[in-house]
Image (cartoon, rainbow, N blue to C red):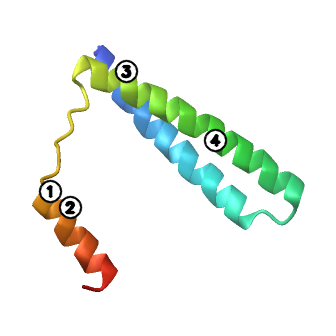
Amino acid sequence: MNSDKDIMENLLQTTKGVCDLYMHGAIESATQNVHTAFDDALNESLCMQSQIYDRMAQQGWYPTEQAQQQQIAKVKNKYAGV
């Protein structure tokens, strides 16, 4: 039997995959109507993904780590051409 955490992880992964499909649909769409349909679906899916992530984070099922300021500065400098 799947735990609640497993179910939420599956939902999150599925939603991320759907977002990817909708993004590519929007990018590749030939008409404005099709683009708008994919764009609207993408935005709804991104909101859903955010809600799933928030719920998982509240349960401690999606731990995050605070980046050190030195690491942030290193990446910024790398892409700033410094």
Task: Work out how far the residue at label 1 is from the one at label 4, CA to CA, in angstroms.
Answer: 31 Å
Q: Residue 20 at what x, y percent from top left?
A: 54, 52
Q: What residue type is disc 1 on?
A: Gln
Q: Are marks 2 and 1 in contact (CB under 8 Å)?
A: yes
- Of marks 1 and 4, the one in the foreground: 1
Q: What residue type is disc 2 on?
A: Ile
Task: Work out how far the residue at label 1 is from the one at label 3, CA to CA, in angstroms.
Answer: 27 Å
Q: Residue 42 at what x, y percent from top left?
A: 64, 44
Q: Earlier in the sequence, mark 1 or mark 4?
A: 4
User: Split into 4 quadrants, where in the image is the N terminus?
Assistant: top left
Crowd class of label 1 (few under 14; some 14 to 19; many from 20; radius 10 Å): few
Q: Which residue is mark 4?
A: 43
Q: Residue 28 at what x, y percent from top left?
A: 72, 66
Q: What residue type is disc 3 on?
A: Arg
Of helix, strand and loop, which one carries label 2? helix
Q: Which residue is mark 2?
A: 72
Q: What residue type is disc 4 on?
A: Asn
Task: Return the residue found at the far bottom.
Answer: 81
Q: Earlier in the sequence, mark 4 or mark 2?
A: 4
Q: Tell me the number on the disc at residue 44.
A: none
Crowd class of label 4 (few under 14; some 14 to 19; many from 20; radius 10 Å): some
